[in-house]
C-alpha cells in the first residue's frame, strides 16, 4: 500500500484530476439515485387470486382452489403452496426458494392457469400477483365527484388510469369501491308468448349481429377504399331494433323485452370522511423511484380533476413519499451533524486548520465515491443505505486522521516535506489497511446471508464496505497529495527549511532526530493528560480488567430493555383499523356498522382523514388485502405533529366503547412496507372436525401470551350456507334430473350472460333476465308463479328447453296452483 502512496505523490496532477472527477460524478450520481423506504426486495412468493362471487368456501375450494393448486404444483422451484378459500375468493400462495427466477416462474404459472381453465368455471379469471415490495401501492387516493359512482368508475378506468400508467416508473393503477354497469334485457312474458320468441333467440340475435366483416377493397374515383360489411350495435336503440329469428310478427328485442343499463351488485363500499368515494391505488415498477413517482402523481392531479369534470376531487389517503423523505432527511441531518462533530474533534486534537481541512476532505469524498458505487450496483437511497453511510462517516475519517497526524508529527521533526510524507505513510500503511479490512470483514459477510435477511441487509453491508474501502484509498492517495500542497513545514516559519543536513553540512544523526521527536511529544497536551491514566491502569491490571468486565456485563444485562422493531415508526402518521363482524353479515349491515366506527374516529382529536372499505375486492392487489365480505378496513391519517403512540391508545379506548361493533383491532401502517406483526401457526388435520378442535385448543393456548394483542383463526370466518337437496326419486318421476333442477334454479337466481356491447367508449356486459331475489330460505323451495295467461316463471325446464325458458313449455298433464304445470315442480327441501 505504501507504493500506492508513492505513486500518487509522483503523479499529483493525475490524482487531482481523479479527485475532481470523483467529486463531480459523485454529486451527479447522488442526485439521480432513486429514493425508497427500503431496498427493492422481490419475495420468492406468487399469489394466485380468483374471484367467484356468490360461491361458498366449499364450492370455491372444490371448483377453483383444488384444480388450480394441482396444476400449479408442477412449477419449477416451488417450495410450498397453501390455498385459502373464502366466500367468493380463492387465494393460492406459492413460495419459492430464494434465488429462483420469478420471471420464469410467472410464465410457467400463466401456462398452468391456461391448462387448468378447462376444468374451471367459465366466468372465473385467475390472476397472479408477485410478492415484491414494488407490488405494494405507493399512493392511495380517494376519488369523488358529482357523478354516480358507476359513471365515475367508468371515467377513471377510461381516462385517469391510462394517464397514470404513462407516468415514468408507474406499473399500474387500480380502481376499487365502485359498481360496474351492465346492459339488462328483461323479457316481458306476455310479449314473448305472443311472438313465440325465446331467450335463445335473443342471445342469438346479439351474437349474430354487430360484427364488422372486412370484405377487401374497391376502387372509387381514383381512390382505394376498404370494404367492410355489417353495422355496429353501439346503442340501446340498436339493441332494441335487432330482429329475432324464428319469431312471429317481425318481433325485435325491444318489442318483447325491456333494455336498460343497470348497475351490478356491489361487492365493496368505500367511504372517505363520511362520503362514498372510489379508491385509486398506484404501484410502481421495481426500478421506479418511489418519491419521484409520488410527486409526479400529485403534480398530475389538477389536470386529472379537470379532465374528469363534475367537481372531481382526488384526496391522498396514504403516500409512502413523505415517510421516505422524512426518514432520509433525518438520516441526512444526523450524518451532517456527525460530519461537523468529526471535523470539530479533529481540529481540537490536531490544533491545525490546514491539517483539519485536509482530513475533512476525505469524508465527503469517500461518501461521493460510495454514491458512485451504489449507482453501479443498482441500489437506491433508502434508510438502510443511508444508515450505513451514517455509520461509515465516523469510520471513514479514521484512516485519514492517522495518516495526516503522522505526517504532521514528522514535519515537526524538521524533516523535508516529501520525506516526511513518505516516511509517515510507510509507518502507518500496514496498520490502517489491516484496521480497515478488519472492519470490512465484520460487515461484508452480511451480504452473503441467504433469505429475506440477506435480501434486506445486503445493500447495507455493501454500502459500508464501499465506504470503508474508499476511505482507505483516499487516505493513501489523495490525502498525501493534499498534505504535500497545503501543509507547512514548521521549519519554514523560522526562515528556511532545514533538510536532513544542518548549516555546517553535517548530517543530523538519528539520535538527534529521536531527541527532537521525544521533546515534541512531551509538549502535547493529550499525552500529558493521558499518560498518568495509563500509568495507573498498568499498575492495577486486575482492577482494570474487573471494571471492563462489569461494564460488559451491565451492557449485556440491559439488552432486553431495548425495543426491537424492523423499521420503527419514525415519521409515521397513519394507522389501520380492522372491524370483523360475524360471518354471513351482509354488505349493507357491515357498512352500517362501519359508519358507527367511522363517526367515532372522525371525532377524535388528531385524526385528519378516515377512509373505510367494506366488503371484498375482486381483482388485483386489493383482492389480496381485502377485508372480507363481512369486514371493514379503515385507513386513518393523523396529524403529523400529534403524539402517534398516545393517539393510537386513544383510538383503541374510544373504539372499545362502541356497542355491537364486532371485533376491532388497531395496527400500524408500516410505511407501506407490507410487513406483518403477526406470528402465523399452520395446523393440519385429517378431518374438518379434528381441525376445528385443534384450532379451538390452539386459540385457547395462545390467548394471553405476553405482548400479544389478539389471537384469531381463519376458521372463525366460516359462513352458513343454504343447501338445497333434491329428492332424486321424485325428480326422476317428474322427468327431471338433479343437474337439471340445479341448472334451472341457478338460471332463476342469476341472469344469463349474452356477450358484450360497446356504447361510446365503454364495454358493457349483456345479461338477459333479472334473476329472482329470495327474501327467505323457505322461498327457495316454493315455486313463484304468475296467474294466467302468464306462464309459470319458476318452471324447471330440462336442458333442451332451458334455452327457451320461460317459453314455450311442454303441455302439462296436470295443473298446479295458478296454472303452473304440476309435473314441472321438482320437489326440493331447503336447509
Image (cartoon, helix red, strand yellow):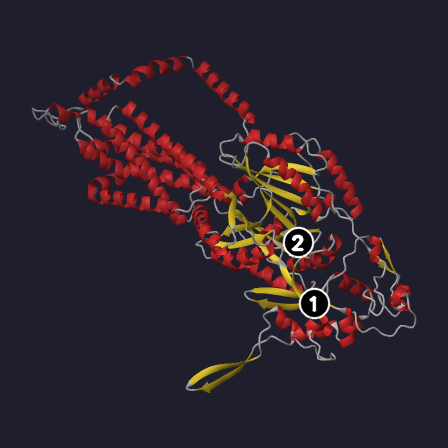
Number of numbered discs visible in the structure rendering: 2
Q: Tell me if mark 1 has few (under 14), some (14-19) or many (20+) residues whose alpha carbon lies within 10 angstroms of its own.
A: some
Kind of element beneath mark 2: loop
Residue 358, by quadrant, is top left
Of 373 and 439, the residue lying toward us? 373
Q: Position of residue 150 (x, y in %)?
A: 60, 56
Residue 329, by quadrant, is top left
From the viewer's perspective, is residue 525 above or below residue 79? above
From the viewer's perspective, is residue 586 above or below residue 436? below
Is disc 2 in contact with disc 1, using a CB cutoff of under 8 Å? no
Residue 827 — which label? none
Of labels 2 and 1, the one closer to you: 1
| One can see residue 445 in this view | no
Q: Position of residue 830 (x, y in %)?
A: 85, 55
Of 815 and 416, the residue lying toward us? 815
Of 388 and 146, the residue lying toward us? 146
Q: Is residue 248 left or right of residue 303?
A: right
Residue 770, by quadrant, is bottom right
Q: Residue at x 37, y 47 (%)?
A: 32
Residue 258 — which label? 1
Q: Is residue 91 left or right of residue 347?
A: right
Can you identify the residue that label 2 sits on? 266
From the viewer's perspective, is residue 413 above or below residue 247? above
Q: Tell me if mark 2 has few (under 14), some (14-19) or many (20+) residues whose alpha carbon lies within 10 angstroms of its own.
A: some
Amino acid at each position: 500500500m505504501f507504493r500506492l502512496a508513492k505513486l500518487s505523490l509522483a503523479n499529483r496532477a493525475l490524482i487531482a484530476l481523479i479527485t475532481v472527477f470523483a467529486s463531480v460524478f459523485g454529486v451527479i450520481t447522488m442526485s439521480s439515485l432513486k429514493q425508497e423506504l427500503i431496498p427493492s426486495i422481490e419475495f420468492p412468493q406468487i399469489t394466485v387470486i380468483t374471484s367467484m362471487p356468490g360461491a361458498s368456501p366449499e364450492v370455491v375450494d372444490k371448483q377453483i382452489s383444488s384444480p388450480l393448486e394441482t396444476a400449479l404444483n408442477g412449477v419449477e422451484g416451488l417450495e410450498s403452496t397453501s390455498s385459502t378459500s373464502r366466500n367468493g375468493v380463492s387465494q393460492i400462495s406459492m413460495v419459492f426458494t430464494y434465488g429462483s427466477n420469478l420471471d420464469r416462474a410467472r410464465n410457467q404459472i400463466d401456462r398452468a392457469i391456461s391448462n387448468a381453465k378447462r376444468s374451471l368455471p367459465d366466468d372465473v379469471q385467475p390472476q397472479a400477483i408477485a410478492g415484491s415490495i414494488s407490488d405494494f401501492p405507493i399512493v392511495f387516493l380517494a376519488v369523488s365527484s358529482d357523478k354516480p359512482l358507476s359513471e365515475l368508475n367508468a371515467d377513471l378506468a377510461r381516462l385517469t388510469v391510462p394517464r397514470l400508467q404513462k407516468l415514468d416508473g408507474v406499473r399500474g393503477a387500480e380502481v376499487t369501491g365502485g359498481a360496474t354497469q351492465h346492459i339488462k334485457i328483461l323479457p316481458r312474458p306476455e310479449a314473448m308468448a305472443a311472438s313465440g320468441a325465446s331467450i335463445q333467440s335473443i342471445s342469438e340475435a346479439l351474437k349474430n349481429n354487430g360484427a364488422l366483416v372486412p370484405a377487401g377493397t374497391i376502387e372509387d374515383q381514383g381512390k382505394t377504399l376498404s370494404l367492410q360489411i355489417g353495422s355496429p350495435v353501439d346503442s340501446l336503440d340498436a339493441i332494441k331494433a335487432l330482429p329475432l329469428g324464428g319469431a312471429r310478427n317481425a318481433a325485435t328485442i325491444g318489442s318483447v323485452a325491456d333494455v336498460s343499463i343497470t348497475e351490478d351488485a356491489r361487492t365493496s363500499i368505500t367511504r372517505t370522511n363520511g362520503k362514498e368515494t372510489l379508491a385509486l391505488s398506484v404501484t410502481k415498477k421495481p426500478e421506479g423511484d418511489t418519491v419521484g413517482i409520488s410527486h409526479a402523481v400529485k403534480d398530475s392531479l389538477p389536470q386529472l380533476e379537470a379532465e374528469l369534470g363534475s367537481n372531481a376531487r382526488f384526496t391522498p389517503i396514504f403516500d409512502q413519499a413523505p415517510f421516505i423523505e422524512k426518514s432520509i432527511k433525518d438520516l441526512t441531518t444526523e450524518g451532517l451533524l456527525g460530519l461537523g462533530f468529526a471535523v470539530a474533534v479533529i481540529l481540537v486534537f490536531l490544533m491545525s486548520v490546514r491539517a483539519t481541512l485536509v482530513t475533512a476532505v476525505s469524508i465527503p469524498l469517500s461518501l461521493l465515491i460510495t454514491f458512485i458505487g451504489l449507482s453501479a450496483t443498482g441500489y437506491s437511497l433508502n434508510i438502510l443505505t443511508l444508515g450505513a453511510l451514517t455509520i461509515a462517516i465516523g469510520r471513514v475519517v479514521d484512516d485519514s486522521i492517522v495518516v495526516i497526524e503522522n505526517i504532521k508529527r514528522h514535519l515537526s521533526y524538521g524533516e523535508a516535506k516529501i520525506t516526511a510524507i513518505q516516511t509517515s505513510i510507510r509507518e502507518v500503511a500496514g496498520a490502517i489497511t489491516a484496521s480497515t479490512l478488519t472492519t470490512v470483514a465484520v460487515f461484508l459477510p452480511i451480504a452473503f446471508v441467504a433469505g429475506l435477511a440477506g435480501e434486506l441487509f445486503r445493500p447495507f453491508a455493501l454500502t459500508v464496505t464501499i465506504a470503508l474501502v474508499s476511505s482507505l484509498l483516499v487516505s493513501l492517495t489523495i490525502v498525501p497529495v493534499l498534505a504535500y500542497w497545503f501543509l507547512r513545514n514548521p521549519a519554514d516559519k523560522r526562515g528556511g527549511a532545514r533538510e536532513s543536513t544542518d548549516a555546517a553540512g553535517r548530517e543530523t544523526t538519528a539520535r538527534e532526530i529521536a531527541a527532537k521527536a521525544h521533546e515534541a511529544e512531551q509538549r502535547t497536551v493529550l499525552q500529558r493528560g493521558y499518560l498518568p491514566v495509563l500509568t495507573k491502569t498498568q499498575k492495577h491490571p486486575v482492577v482494570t480488567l474487573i471494571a471492563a468486565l462489569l461494564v460488559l456485563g451491565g451492557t449485556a444485562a440491559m439488552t432486553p430493555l431495548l425495543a426491537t422493531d424492523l423499521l420503527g415508526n419514525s415519521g409515521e402518521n397513519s394507522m389501520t383499523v380492522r372491524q370483523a363482524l360475524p360471518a354471513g353479515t351482509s354488505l349493507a349491515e357491515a357498512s352500517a356498522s362501519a359508519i358507527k366506527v367511522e363517526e367515532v374516529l372522525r371525532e377524535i382529536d388528531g385524526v385528519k382523514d378516515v377512509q373505510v372499505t367494506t366488503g371484498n375486492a375482486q381483482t388485483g392487489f386489493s383482492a389480496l388485502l381485502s377485508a372480507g365480505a363481512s369486514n371493514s378496513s379503515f385507513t386513518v391519517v393523523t396529524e403529523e405533529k400529534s403524539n402517534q403512540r398516545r393517539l393510537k391508545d386513544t383510538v383503541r379506548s374510544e373504539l372499545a366503547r362502541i356497542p355491537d361493533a364486532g371485533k376491532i383491532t388497531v395496527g400500524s401502517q408500516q410505511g407501506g412496507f407490507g410487513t406483518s406483526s403477526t406470528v402465523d401457526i399452520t395446523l393440519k388435520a385429517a378431518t374438518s372436525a379434528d381441525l376445528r378442535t385443534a384450532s379451538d385448543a390452539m386459540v385457547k393456548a395462545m390467548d394471553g401470551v405476553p405482548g400479544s394483542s389478539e389471537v384469531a383463526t381463519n376458521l372463525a370466518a366460516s359462513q352458513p350456507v343454504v343447501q338445497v337437496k333434491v329428492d332424486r326419486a321424485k325428480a326422476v318421476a317428474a322427468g327431471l334430473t338433479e343437474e337439471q333442477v340445479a341448472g334451472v334454479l341457478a338460471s332463476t337466481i342469476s341472469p344469463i350472460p349474452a356477450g358484450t356491447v360497446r356504447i361510446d367508449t365503454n364495454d358493457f356486459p349483456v345479461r338477459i333476465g333479472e334473476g329472482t331475489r329470495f327474501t327467505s330460505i323457505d322461498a327457495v323451495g316454493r315455486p313463484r308463479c304468475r296467474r294466467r295467461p302468464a306462464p309459470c316463471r319458476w318452471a324447471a325446464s330440462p336442458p333442451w328447453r332451458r334455452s327457451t325458458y320461460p317459453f314455450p313449455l311442454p303441455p302439462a298433464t296436470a295443473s298446479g296452483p295458478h296454472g303452473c304445470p304440476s309435473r314441472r315442480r321438482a320437489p326440493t327441501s331447503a336447509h
